[in-house]
Amino acid sequence: MATWQTSTTVQARPEQILDVLTDPEAAVRWSPIDFDVDFVDGGRLTTGSSARVTGRLAGREIAFDIEVIRADEQRLLLTATGPIEIDVKYDVEPLDSHVELRAWVTVRSRGGLFGRILSGATEGLLGAGMLNAAVARIAREVEASHELPLAA
């Protein structure tokens, strides 16, 4: 089991960040791994909701069941269960004119040869900066989707 973390600042309000974090269509854009959303309870990630996603990693198609433990203006906390288990936490801390977005990802093998291979591959991607890239894309997505129109 290994945990990675990163952070960035975003010119936005906490609810704007949560809007991007809990929107499945936005997640497809900022996620470092290509995946398809098979379903999401209620169309959006909310506390207690679930989802199912499929994608390709380590040369194989894999599916994950997502359980959202908490989704509010301060935090998104979820678990993705498939051949490996991934715990994801995003914390949002309002500062003066911006917000600090912190992210943690913990990866655990669920056993078996493929689980160990996939866990190692995922850890390798995280170690190569996958989480940093995802958080930077989240910040760009938030700032682009909430730009104020220019005054006439």
Image (cartoon, helix red, strand yellow):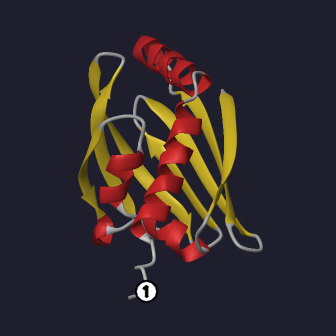
Residue lying furthest bottom: 152
Determine whether, in the image, residue 104 is placed left or right of residue 18: right
Location of residue 13 with respect to 76 vertically, above or below = below
Residue 105 lies, in percent from the top left, at: 61, 40
- Residue type of the residue flagged with mark 1: Ala
Q: Nearer the viewer, residue 91 or 95?
A: 95
Helix, strand or loop at mark 1: loop
In the rendered image, residue 45, in percent from the top left (x then y), is placed at 41, 65
Indicate whether 151 appears above or below 57. Answer: below
Is disc 1 surrounded by few (<14), some (14 to 19) or many (20+) residues within 10 Å?
few
Left or right: residue 33 compared with residue 11? left
* Residue name at image x 51 percent, y 36 percent: 85
Asked if residue 47 shows in the view, the reply is no
Residue visible at 57% across and 21% down? 128
The spot of residue 100 in percent (x, y) is: 70, 60
Write down the residue under mark 1: 151
